[in-house]
Image (cartoon, grey):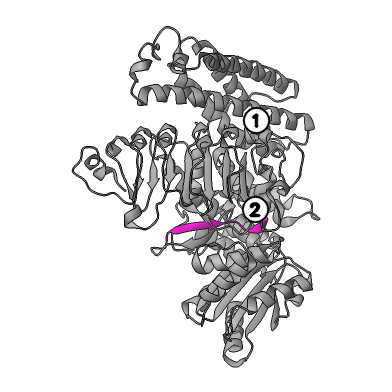
Amino acid sequence: MSLSLRKQQLLPPSLIKLSAQTMEGEAAAAVLQTLVQNLIDLCKKEISQIRDLDKNTAKLAGNLDMIKNFLKDAETRNITNDAVKSWLKRLEDVAFDADNVLDEINYNILSKQIKPTEPEEEEVPSCFSRLSCFSCCKNLSRSRNMALTIKEINENLESINKEAANLGLVEKLANEPTLVIASSETDSFSDDPVFIGRDGVKLEIVEMLTNSITNDERKVSIISIVGMGGLGKTTLTRKVFNHLKDETRFGSHIWVHVSPNFDAITLLKKILKELTDQVEGESKQDILSKLQQALKDKTYLLVFDDVWNEDLSIWEDFMKSLLGVSCVKGNAIVVTTRSTKVASIVNPLHTHELEGLSKEDCWSIIKVKTFGEGNVPSEFEAIGRKIARRCQGLPLAANVVGGILSNQSEEEWRSIEEKWLSADEGGDNISKILRLSFDNLSLPSLKKCFAYCAMFPKGSKISKRKLIEMWMAEGFLQADERDDMESVGEKFINVLLRNSLLQVSKRAHDGNVKKCGMHDLVHDLACSVSSSSNSTRGISRDRYNCGISKEMAKNLRTLLFEGYISNINFSDLESLHVLRLECYRVEELPSSIKKLIHLRDFDISKTRIEVFPDWIGEFFHLQTLRIRSPALPERRRELPSTIKYLINLRHLYINEWVELPMGIGRLTSLQTLKYFPVSDEDGSAKLKSSEV
């Protein structure tokens, strides 16, 4: 379960809607394989350390192996049978229970191995005594409960295995798929998606905007771009935006994704955040006052991407507020929308109705995605042109199918052509090719990573580094002989970019991808395979985009929370792997957070927390920690000495006002440490060679 909550100005927390649905059949089977494989690996690891329970744990590994083989069969089927879907749901619940129990066992083992034994604890038997590894737990009754839970999980899995056979599923033994990284792997400098056939339109809109601000006495000139989903409105507008930004025609350049919820306060906050990178004001008056300061004596180019609001009065009220913050003339607004009504009510100077690409342009996009600048063999071209006609002028379809065809054989090209062309003519063409692109992903873990992105709102710019760290925290990335988890995550990003299931939103100065995004239609696909469509079904154990209730909280694994946290009892979130808090009014960490023993990714960098408690050192599974301190030398803060116990920590993000304690050299897994004050004290010097 993943959750992204943002405090809404007009909705109190009690009215935040739930989103809970089970994953669709074969997609669920694919992504569940990742969890089951992780459990098998963990079981085998724990067998040697669990003395009295090695038999039950070995049995658990065997049951999971059998389940995994059934899942391979389920993934290859078009599952419409409600009984099979119910079976997958039961399996998901039991698998997550098993994951939590094994993770807790591992936590207790780590606790005993990492922290020195206190004198008053010396009479407690060690983990290597005859009693069992559960003597590592101070509370023996809890140890017995864990043992009973493993026994219960085994019984449930045996029942699920029997049910699978009754449903007609068979154990399918197959070699593990491998991740194919094409020689034309997405690089740091190429355009994504491929932009072909729109250069004339781009220059036309650039000229129109330039003339309007030069020759018009209006305070703001508005241009609307309208067209169906997948036509490339956002890509075209981004090209126009970047062109004018490079020419420095405007003092400020602002990009805001709107989405169906047209809320004035939310939009004004987004504009302010683009200008200042911080939003402190709560009231409309505060925000408008800060906007006035940010836009003082500056012209601006403002893009409202993906507008759905068709209520003229709402738009007019919003524009009155926006126009009131600046007296400067020569501003421009570009609105993109699928609705001709929206395009008209914004009172545009010009409306551009975007048309589809030619078949030749669609074929050109496919060629670039598959063969780059090289020549296309004639046998491939004949098939490719048929596929290009099927794109129906949609650049998104051409980009996606080009990603699927990349580095495939002629036989595979024919197979993809047949799969797509055999679909019902009356259906949603773009949805079919997007689903085909998802099905074509080779690894279940890669499908899981794609589905996970559904938790981010449409239009989000997702930090590539943070996304990889979140995948890692959820257990989706497994290191191999050649690559560590981060490198596997980079490869996954590249594959999703190549298949146009992710798009580049922002690049660093060196051209490398910094932030990613999703086309709205691709986001719809991610939601459909990850159970993220909006519905309220009461209590649920689904693990994607659920609202917080006590019953649901215990199954939540990712929580991204924007808002004050005073009403949250974090001890209820017992399964949490990822916790990110964003609120500059938060100045202290609740002690209930220390109960989150499964935590692997902890981000409090966008808070005002200054005191870091000692119990941070008890997050033995923690892989990523992001913290900050006020940029004032007299308020410099030091991390607690207990941080040396975080032996699994790989990434520590701090600013220069955070001091490191002695003993930091024990963090031998550390890969990222931006600020590292050099010291002659024992412990600090040891890390200098490990700093990245």
Residue 622 horizontal side relative to residue 437, left or right? left
Q: Amino acid at mark 1?
A: Glu
**Of residues 642 and 181, the one drawn nearer to the viewer in this rendering:** 642
User: Relative to residue 181, is residue 343 depicted above or below?
Assistant: below
Describe the element under mark 2 as helix, strand or loop. helix
**121 left or right, relative to 406:** left
Q: Is residue 518 magenta?
A: yes
Nearest to N terminus: mark 1 or mark 2 = 1
Sort mark 1 into few (<14), some (14-19) or many (20+) by Cα contacts within 10 Å.
many
**Image position, residue 261 (x, y; %):** 71, 60
- 26, above or below 288, in the image: above
| The residue positioned farthest toward the right in the image shown | 426
- Along the line of sight, which residue is nearer the eye, 458 or 426? 458
Residue 10 position in % (x across, y down): 70, 58
Q: Is residue 80 left or right of residue 358?
A: right
115, above or below 261, in the image: above
Give how far across and how far down residue 34 sits, in percent.
56, 34
Residue 92 is tagged as 1
Residue ID at (78%, 73%): 313
- Compared with 175, 252 (above or below) is below
Q: Residue at x 50, y 17 (%)?
A: 139
Mark 2, residue position: 523
